[in-house]
């Protein structure tokens, strides 16, 4: 059984659109391969080989997207205890040592982009805050060693 793929509704729709576009490209590539094959000797037919390579890449991505979408759990639809930090929560955490605050939305790995405030639930920091309530102090096992944080604010938008 495949792993659940957590994704927001927006990202799910973006992946559906990408899949639709790739299927159109796949049809175009089939035509290109047919045309290139009709030109004769395939051993020295660069257009044919380029189209076949692009087709293989496209089919691989289509397969990957179909698997992800089949196993998708849209985080917008999840019923979670909103008194605890879970996927879909926006958390403001304070680094107790550096006295700095950060705000992140906890997302699935496919959407993670810390620079845009999107933190993967698989990351060490998110792993530390998951299940915590507003006001809780927790430790995160970061690559540079353990660090203490406080969950200052918890909200679901």
Image (tube, rainbow, N blue to C red):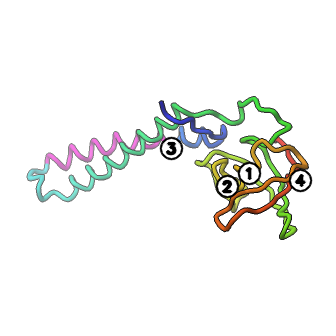
Q: Secondary structure at mark 2?
A: helix
Q: Which residue is mark 3?
A: 18
Q: Which residue is mark 4?
A: 152
Q: Is residue 28 magenta?
A: yes
Q: Secondary structure at mark 1?
A: helix
Q: Nearer the viewer, mark 3 or mark 1?
A: 1
* Crowding near the residue tagged with mark 1, few <14, some 14–19, many ≥20 C-alpha atoms within 10 Å: many
In this picture, residue 109 sits left or right of residue 139 = left
Query: Residue 56's spot in the image, x, y percent?
Result: 31, 47
* Disc 4 from disc 2: Cα separation: 18 Å
* Crowding near the residue tagged with mark 4, few <14, some 14–19, many ≥20 C-alpha atoms within 10 Å: some
Q: Which residue is mark 2?
A: 124
Range drawn in magenta: 18-38
Query: Residue 5's spot in the image, x, y percent?
Result: 57, 38
Quadrant assignment for the C terminus: top right
The answer to whether marks 4 and 1 mark residues whose Cβ atoms lie closer than 8 Å is no
Q: Which residue is found at the position 19% from the left and 50% from the top?
A: 36
* Disc 3 from disc 1: Cα separation: 33 Å
Q: Secondary structure at mark 3?
A: helix
Q: Which mark is residue 12?
A: none
Q: Nearer the viewer, mark 4 or mark 3?
A: 4
């Amino acid at each position: 059984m495949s792993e659940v793929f957590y994704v927001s509704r927006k990202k799910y729709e973006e992946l559906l659109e990408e899949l639709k576009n790739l299927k159109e490209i796949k049809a175009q590539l089939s035509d290109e391969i047919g045309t290139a094959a009709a030109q004769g000797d395939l051993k020295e037919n660069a257009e044919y080989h380029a189209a076949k390579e692009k087709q293989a890449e496209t089919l691989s991505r289509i397969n990957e997207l179909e698997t992800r979408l089949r196993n998708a759990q849209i985080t917008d639809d999840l019923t979670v205890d909103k008194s605890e930090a879970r996927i879909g929560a926006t958390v403001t955490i304070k680094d107790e040592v550096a006295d700095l605050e950060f705000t992140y939305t906890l997302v699935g790995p496919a959407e993670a982009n810390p620079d845009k405030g999107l933190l993967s639930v698989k990351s060490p920091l998110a792993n530390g805050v998951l299940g915590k309530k507003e006001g809780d102090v927790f430790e995160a096992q970061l690559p540079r060693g353990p660090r203490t944080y406080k969950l200052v604010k918890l909200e679901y938008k």
